[in-house]
Image (cartoon, grey):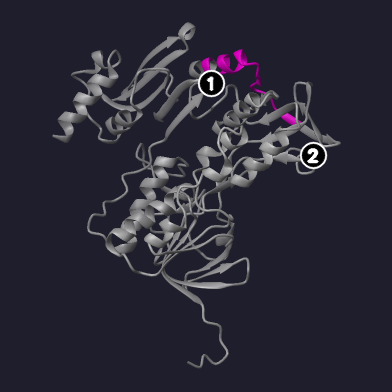
Amino acid sequence: MDTGGEAIMDHSKYLIVGSSHAGLSAIEAIRVQDTAGAMTLLTQEEHFPYSPTILPYVVSAKVDAGKVFLMDQAYMDRLAVKFRPGARVVGVDPASRTVSLESGETLEYENLLLATGAEPTLPPIPGLQEAPFHVLRTLEDAQRLGKTAQVAKSAIILGAGLIGMHAAESLAQAGLDVTIVEALPHLLPGYFEKQAAGLIQKVFAEHGLHILTGSIVTHVTSSNGACAVSLESGLDLSADLLVVATGVKPRISYLASSEIEADAGILVDDTMRTSASNIWAAGDVAQAKSFLDSSKVVQGTLPTAVEQGRTAGLDMVGDPALKPYPGSVPMNTYKFFGHRSFSIGLVDVAEPGEDMEVDQVFLPSGIQYQKFVYQNDRLVGVSCINASMDPGIMHQLIRRQIDLSEVKKRFAGAPVEIGRLLMKKTWS
């Protein structure tokens, strides 16, 4: 057929941009209803999909980087997915239903899912951009950091969120002397309140790590590959390697000229639809309804990515099983030096209020902590360290807004047993 010299663009009924949990969940949902529609999966990385949660174990060499992938080519073939690694999206044109790649190629789509995830944010610290720092967001980041750690003796971690704490533990287990610097008053802000964070800090200190909270970095310098960090307090630190783990932000710069509505992330409705026709967003890049209030939030957790991806996929394929996205509930599990912890929902409520109640148990000698936050006799938040609890059940109790008024006095003492009984009654 004569095309008149025009290039034939690659065309997909379903174009998925981003190959982590949100994109993969959407693919699975779509293929239940449409087993043959042309589908393309793009990722800017050069690998098959993997879970970012495995990266700290790649750094410490506990896990072989070649064995972290969630699926292989056989999986792509079975689901009839055209997998394209190394395909970085630089533009989206909703009017022509096309996506532009960094390579110069243009792809056509009928339905587009943006699941491009998040990227590290860098604090505006003088000298940081000129220093040889590391981040931990991709498999390449983990491999690079692990390789550097093999010849380093010391490390400084900027940021005490989950990424920073995981990186610190991995490097300490690799034999490095590690110092964590956090600007806020306690570590893991947003995940645990002060008492719980203090228990975690105690464990890290017992394993030889140094933690400086409430510490503002004023300047970074480097010399012969090593880095020096100056603090507002006047203290100067130096180490062989520097890791910046001060946060992430949704990767949405490629939407600059698309007119797709975005705020902190890509704004979506209850079926993950964006403001543009036939375009959805899910995962760390999406700003969706919160379950806990009327706001829209970016909730960068694995369970949220899976649920949002599935919702988007069901809507993209017109599945009658589609239900509106109920809203994001923060849920994070965290294991450190053999201890286990998690936080779900509103965990930063410190004092009881007009309709709020806080039930807290704190046992520092046993590294045990549990906290329940109730609103009108319904669980809205729970966090724990080494407590006998099932995070899945706690999450469902919050999501289902189950009235706990009759069992609340006994619930804190037996959350597993009572939680299971409540869920059994609900499901039956």
- Residue 127, disc: 2
**Is 122 drawn above or below residue 424 in the view shown?**
below
Of 214 and 236, nearer the camera is: 236
Which residue appears at 34% of the width and 62% of the height? 316
The three-letter code of the residue at mark 1 reads Phe
- Residue 120 image offset from top left, x and y in percent: 61, 44
Of 388 and 332, nearer the camera is: 388
Q: Which residues are magenta?
A: 199-218
Residue 205 located within the stretch drawn in magenta? yes
- Residue 152 image offset from top left, x and y in percent: 75, 30
- Residue 385 image offset from top left, x and y in percent: 44, 19
Q: Is residue 73 left or right of residue 218?
A: left
Q: Is residue 383 left or right of residue 149?
A: left
Q: Secondary structure at mark 1?
A: loop
Of 44 and 97, nearer the camera is: 44
Residue 234 lies in quadrant: top right
Find disc 1 in the rendering and name its residue: 337
- The C terminus - image quarter: top left
Question: Which of the two discs, 1 and 2, labels the residue nearer the N terminus?
Answer: 2
The three-letter code of the residue at mark 2 reads Gly
- Residue 178, disc: none
Between the residue at mark 1 and the residue at mark 2, the CA separation in whole angstroms equals 33 Å
